[in-house]
Image (cartoon, rainbow, N blue to C red):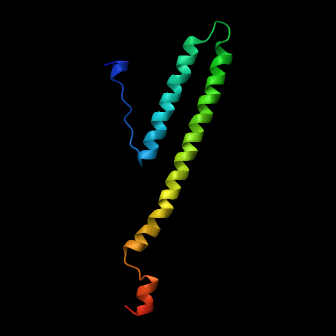
């Protein structure tokens, strides 16, 4: 049984929201390159598509790096917030002995 391309869906398990975004951005980058290819002037297809691949690839890698840095920053901030939420003594409470 063949499935219509319109019915295709990406069925994938993601560890987090950032992974899902990276996968979606890769598909969008591919679509952008394909659109460029379809509009490339005759005889310049490879040149135009290669340039689009390089541009899309750089942009995708920039977004991946940005998302990775954001995730790392959030991960580092969570333990500090958790320590404060656990009721560690503030300096004024410690000084008062309470």
Q: Quadrant of the N terminus?
A: top left
Q: Quadrant of the C terminus?
A: bottom left
Q: Residue furthest left?
A: 1
Q: Is residue 72 left or right of residue 1?
A: right
Image vertical order of residue 82 relative to residue 49, above or below: below
Front residue (pair 79, 27) = 79
Image vertical order of residue 84 relative to residue 7, above or below: below
Image vertical order of residue 64 relative to residue 98, above or below: above
Image vertical order of residue 61 relative to residue 91, above or below: above
Tell me where residue 23 appears, x and y as whole percent: 47, 37
Q: Quadrant of residue 78?
A: bottom left
Q: Quadrant of residue 85?
A: bottom left
Front residue (pair 22, 89) = 89
Tell me where residue 26 appears, x and y as whole percent: 51, 33
Residue at point 39% right, 38% down?
A: 12
Tell me where residue 58 appears, x and y as whole percent: 62, 35
Q: Residue furthest bottom?
A: 97
Residue at point 50% right, 63% down?
A: 76
Tell me where residue 4 appears, x and y as whole percent: 34, 18
Residue at point 33% right, 23% down?
A: 7
Total marks drawn? 0
Residue at point 48% right, 60% down?
A: 75
Q: Is residue 6 left or right of residue 22?
A: left
């Amino acid at each position: 049984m063949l499935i219509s391309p319109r019915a295709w869906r990406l069925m994938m398990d993601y560890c987090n929201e950032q992974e899902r975004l990276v996968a979606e951005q890769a598909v969008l980058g591919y679509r952008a390159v394909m659109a460029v290819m379809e509009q490339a002037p005759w005889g310049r297809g490879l040149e135009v598509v290669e340039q689009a691949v390089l541009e899309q690839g750089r942009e995708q890698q920039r977004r991946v790096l940005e998302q990775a840095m954001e995730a790392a920053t959030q991960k580092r901030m969570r333990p500090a917030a958790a320590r404060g939420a656990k009721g560690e003594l503030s300096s004024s409470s410690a000084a008062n002995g309470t």
